[in-house]
Image (cartoon, coloured by chain):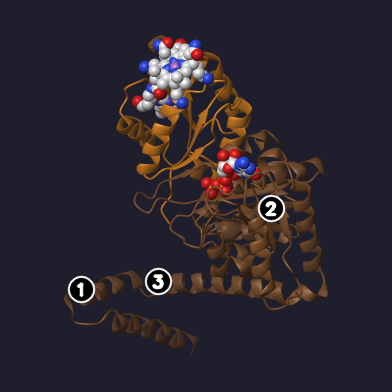
Amino acid sequence: MSLVENGAPEAEALLERVYGARPAAPRVGVTGPPGAGKSTLVAELALLLRRRGKRVGVVAVDPTSPYTGGAILGDRVRMSELSTDPEVFIRSMATRGSLGGLAARTEELAELLSGWGSDITLIETVGVGQSELDVAQAADTTLVVLTPESGDAIQSLKAGLMEIADVFVVNKSDHAGADQLAAAIRSALALRPKAPWMPPIVRTVATERRGIEELHEAIEAHRAHLAGPKAQGGRREKIRARLKNAIRERLLEAAWERQGLGALLDRAADQVLGGTVSPYRAARDLIERITDHGERSKN
Amino acid sequence: MARKIRVLVAKAGLDGHDRGAKVVASAMRDAGFEVIYTGLHQTPEMIVQAAVQEDVDAVALSILSGAHMTLFPRVLELMREKGIGDVLLTGGGIIPKADMTALRQMGVGELFGPGTSTTAIIEYIRGAAPGGAASRSAKAGSAR
Ligand code: B12
Ligand SMILES: Nc1nc2c(ncn2[C@@H]2O[C@H](COP(=O)(O)OP(=O)(O)OP(=O)(O)O)[C@@H](O)[C@H]2O)c(=O)[nH]1
Ligand SMILES: [Mg+2]
């Protein structure tokens, strides 16, 4: 797993082998503001799945400090109850500079867990509020966890969480304001254009194991929807986007190595610094060099 | 991509003194490590399973309860059993000098008492646990 996380050269062959070995386990993404109860919910869902005899993989992402490059990965604190069960594999990851709420290799690690034999993989994002949208890409079903306290909840609804949520979870429903929050979500949903899947709203109290069954049912219902004819377009979109990412990364890497882009970049940076070219011009020149080479090597 | 040093920081047994563990974990983060913090009341079994799954370079226990002479050897034994005997086991807390020596002889790494500078701890881990996880994964060639 470290090989994959570090982007080691052996990683691709490993992933290839895993990918072919087994159908990918369904992935459930869990996102929401800091402290909303994501880890507690993941732990409770995992416990429920264990009671039903499923093997469970968990990928929990926490932020890397932009200043030191280090990280404290604390999601395991809420998952103690799972931590001697050999049928549960929990892996913590740091974002290492990626901004979308996941780490760069989250999807790949989820695939390894699938290779390990997980029947379902739960992915917890960092609680960053508004930029955790990557998870919708990585997961088949995305849970958006809000609480009565998330005062900016309504803001988040506008800021795109609306588009990524397959299921809304109103956690900490033991606190005042849960009704209002559910109502606010409902009215925001009503404004949305009609879609084949309407995200249900599930109320939970993760710390008291309340609403977890209902949440699981909602996830299952979404999965059934995904398997149906109305959903094919969406899944195809995700696979397409995933391929695009893989290609982008690979192409950039190849160009970087083949043409010593690192050195060119240094030179361009010096020129921009010296005021002889604008950054836009420098970037355009570099891109031209790359695409030029691409054309020639084809012939 | 540069490899990060990954360290599991755990509080074992019924010991509720978590200040030292948190201080050390924060210092490690500030030094650029990825710290997996498990929280309180971990059993040796929990600690070792987490260490295996998280593919860490070092397991670092904080023990102020006096139970170090049972907890460290048990964790070490389980680590060897689970095939991660090459991972560094270190830690700190209230541990008499004589016990530190005895534990070292069993194969536990350096242990640190009250008043140790976190710089000393970080330098030690940097030196004693380089590439543990990477070399192991390469050898095993497995998903884990
Ligand atoms: C603060 C404190 C408490 C607080 C704890 C608050 C908290 N959340 O942490 C409270 C009041 C709750 C408490 C309670 C008790 N305490 Co008290 N407590 C202390 C005290 C005064 C300071 C500990 C501390 O936080 N130090 C500051 C931190 C930063 O230092 P540190 O933990 O030692 O960490 C340093 C090193 O040890 C090392 N280190 C520590 N952990 C790790 C981990 C790694 C990985 C590494 C590399 C290094 C490392 O590096 C750190 C930095 O230098 C000590 C006495 C002392 N001077 O040590 C007693 C002490 C630890 N407590 C003691 C006792 C007996 C208790 C109680 C049992 C008392 C009682 N009868 O109720 C309870 C038990 C509580 C429980 N559930 O475990 C005894 C332990 C005796 C023993 N082990 O033989 C001590 C030594 C006091 C004494 N002289 O009797 N305590
Ligand atoms: N009252 C109440 N507290 C809860 C509930 N769910 C979680 N909590 C508490 O909320 C706090 C945060 O829970 P976590 O599960 O760590 O939240 P998180 O979203 O994973 O947090 P980050 O990963 O730090 O963003 C903990 O103290 C939980 O015990 C709930 O339903 N009701
Ligand atoms: Mg969490």
Q: A125 above or below A292?
A: above
- The residue labelled by disc 1 is A273
Mark count: 3
Secondary structure under badge 3?
helix
B98 with respect to A26 (left or right) = left
Give the chain of mark 3: A
**Residue B74 position in % (x across, y down):** 58, 20
Left or right: where does residue A6 sit relative to residue B121? right
Disc 2 packing (10 Å; few <14; some 14–19; many ≥20) = many
Question: Which numbered dot is residue B126?
Answer: none
Say which residue label 2 marks. A121
In front here: A19 or A88?
A88
Element marked by disc 2: strand
- Give coordinates of residue B132: x percent, y percent: 47, 39
On the rendered image, what quadrant is the N terminus of chain B found in? Answer: bottom left
Name the foreground residue: A213 vs A80. A213
- Chain letter for mark 2, please: A
| Chain letter, colour brown in render | A
Residue B17's place in the image compared with A112, above or below, is above
Rendered image quadrant of residue A31? bottom right
* Circle 3/circle 2 CB separation < 8 Å: no
Question: Residue A169, position in %: x, y?
Answer: 67, 55
Labels 3 and 2 positioned on one and the same chain: yes
The quarter of the image holding the C terminus of chain B is top right
**Mark 1: amino acid:** Leu
| Left-right relation of A206 to A228 | left
Chain whose colour in the figure is orange? B
Q: Nearer the viewer, mark 3 or mark 2?
A: 2
Mark earlier in primary sequence (3, 2)? 2
Find disc 3 in the rendering and name its residue.
A256
